[in-house]
Amino acid sequence: MYLINYTSDDFQKHLQKSDTVIVPIGSVEAHGHHLPLGTDIFSPRLFCQMIEEKIGDYVWIAPEIPYGQSYDLSVYPGTIHVPSEVLAEYVYAVGKSLYENGLKKLIFLNGHGGNINALNLASEKLAQLGMTVLTINWWLDFSKEILTITEGQGHAGEDETSAILYYDERLVQMDKATKNFKKPLYRVYFKDRGKILYENAMSGDATLATKEKGEKIFKLLTEKIVEIILNVRNGKYIAD
């Protein structure tokens, strides 16, 4: 149920069907020379479309939040960076308003790693209101499953490039796909970290990406995400 497609009266009437809402979170950020700036928006958007097809009567889907924390990649043209503390407050305000409208369970469907700190901060505050909040980081939480399909992962790497090829291959310039295997030894911050670590605004091997791999990723992960959503909706999120 796409929230913005309903009138106020119809929203109130259908609220009894579900008190669970998905909020897709993305970023506008450089993804190599071959992927669009909206890559982290498009993946959650397609997941939501596939979720709607499968369990649309059981969950609300709110409009996406397109901007995110992109400190590392802000050295590259087109990247829009929102500091974590600002993003956390904004996301909290959105979640609080959803809660006040009767949506008691919230799932952040996140498409961008830089958003994680802000989403954790917002989730802690929302939980204090009485809301149940879950963040799904699709490329991270299902890394094991993705690596049954691709040889590797990375920012604008094989997995993300395959995902966008499946989303809309017209947006991908595969002739510009490159490789970058640099990885930090530690979780360390330093000047020009983004330019050094994410050379050419990417990591991994984008040249191995295919549309077919993207299709497999989306279909496999959608099944996993749907199961999680239904469990959260039904209050099943703690192992006995």
Image (cartoon, helix red, strand yellow):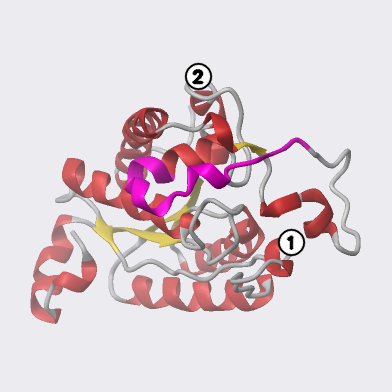
Looking at marks 1 and 2 on the same chain, the residue that comes earlier in the sequence is marked by 1
Q: Is residue 172 shown above or below 238?
A: below
Q: Residue at x 49, y 25 (%)?
A: 145
Residue 72 - label: 1
- The amino acid beneath tag 1 is Asp
Magenta span of residues: 164-181
Give coordinates of residue 112: x percent, y percent. Answer: 56, 55
Mark 1: few, some, or many residues within 10 Å (few <14, many ≥20)?
many
Residue 148 - label: 2
Magenta segment's dominant SS is helix
Please say if the residues under marks 1 and 2 sit with CB atoms less than 8 Å apart: no
Q: Residue at x 84, y 58 (%)?
A: 193
Would residue 106 be seen by someone viewing this image from the given angle?
yes
Q: Disc 2 on helix, strand or loop?
A: loop
Would residue 19 be seen by someone viewing this image from the given angle?
no
Q: Is residue 99 shown above or below 148?
A: below
Q: Residue at x 60, y 61 (%)?
A: 30
